Amino acid sequence: MVEFVLRHWGDDDERFAAAVGLSVTFRQVLVEARPSSEAIEAAKNAVWGALVVTPCVPQLPCFQNLDKAVDYSEVHSTLVGYSGPPPRAEPFRVSTFNKHYMKPWRWATGGVEMNHSLLPLMACLYRLLNTLDAVPVVVSDVRIKPTAQAAADYMVIPTWHAPREVAEVVDIHLPPLKASALAFGILTGGYLAGPVVAVVKKRDWLAGEVVKAGGYVVVLEEPGDVCRLPVDKSVGYSVEKRIYRVDPALCDRCGDCLKTACGAIAPSKSGLPEISEECVGCGACALVCTRGAIY
């Protein structure tokens, strides 16, 4: 038995990515698609519920019995093939997402080293999401590698952790699977524990579907203010580089600015942050400063 059957929607990789989105939110899904080998490789360690692909592809174990295919996929947290008759979908459990279930950064691996063009984006999302009494899911086409080591979380229910740096806000990064398709799958599965945000390189028809389904979209190739995301739901992203300073009268040494993990800002001997000549003026530290001490 499966909860969702995806067919006749988007191209094969887009449909497959939406199925992966359903699977990472603890759903059992069958997808009729012939995904690329790159897409299959990206999703091999991403399954949490169950993900069954039909028709069978050479890279995956193949089953003729659907119940056995679903059980194998769920027990081994992997995708499998299926060659039997098309099943009926019967949703039966709650959509849920745990950021560190069993494996740290299970759904977000790889990415780039410190990138000042992306740092304000992550800083603004950090500021917006860190104050919510919810479990947001950020699905992104881009990611900065965190410098901190994440600990495994064995809670199955949706859980939110306090990120130790802004790079940790990205929960799912599975290129070449599109963030918009993954986010649409999560929303289709009925995830209600928090907002679903898709950070995409360029706008396509899927970005519109994410917003229609109740999600939020950041489009990197369009100008705009990402901090308006809660109001506008779909925004562009622009970085205005400036010179930044620290006001000692407002700083209480909370350390929030250091969560950017930027090498251009560090505590002095007195504990006050100092901005060095290495600063490129991206403004991420000012975005996460809750005291208004960086201007």
Image (tube, helix red, strand yellow):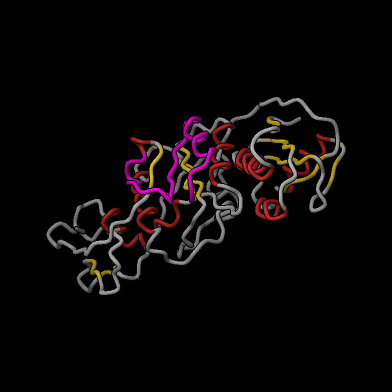
Q: Nearer the viewer, residue 220 or 268?
A: 220
Q: Nearer the viewer, residue 208 or 187?
A: 208
Q: Position of residue 223 (x, y in %)?
A: 36, 49
Q: Quadrant of the N terminus?
A: top right
Q: How many marks?
A: 0
Q: Is residue 147 above or below residue 223?
A: below
Instruction: Please state if 62 lies on the left or on the right of 1 as rendered.
Output: right
Q: Quadrant of the C terminus?
A: bottom left
Instruction: Please state if 169 lies on the left or on the right of 26 as rendered.
Output: left
Q: Is residue 74 above or below residue 176?
A: above
Instruction: Please state if 93 lies on the left or on the right of 238 as rendered.
Output: right
Q: Position of residue 263 (x, y in %)?
A: 34, 70
Q: Which residues are magenta?
A: 201-229
**Residue at 64% of width from left, 37% of height from top?**
10
**Residue at 28% of width from left, 64% of height from top?**
281
Seen as rendered, the residue at the extreme left is 249
Instruction: Please state if 195 lies on the left or on the right of 258 as rendered.
Output: right
Quadrant of residue 175 within the rendered picture:
bottom right
Q: Position of residue 108 (x, y in %)?
A: 55, 54
Q: Determine if the magenta segment contains residue 209.
A: yes
Quadrant of residue 134 within the rendered picture:
top left
**Residue at 48% of width from left, 48% of height from top?**
202
Q: Determine if the magenta segment contains residue 92.
A: no
Quadrant of residue 7 within the rendered picture:
top right
Q: Position of residue 246 (x, y in %)?
A: 18, 63
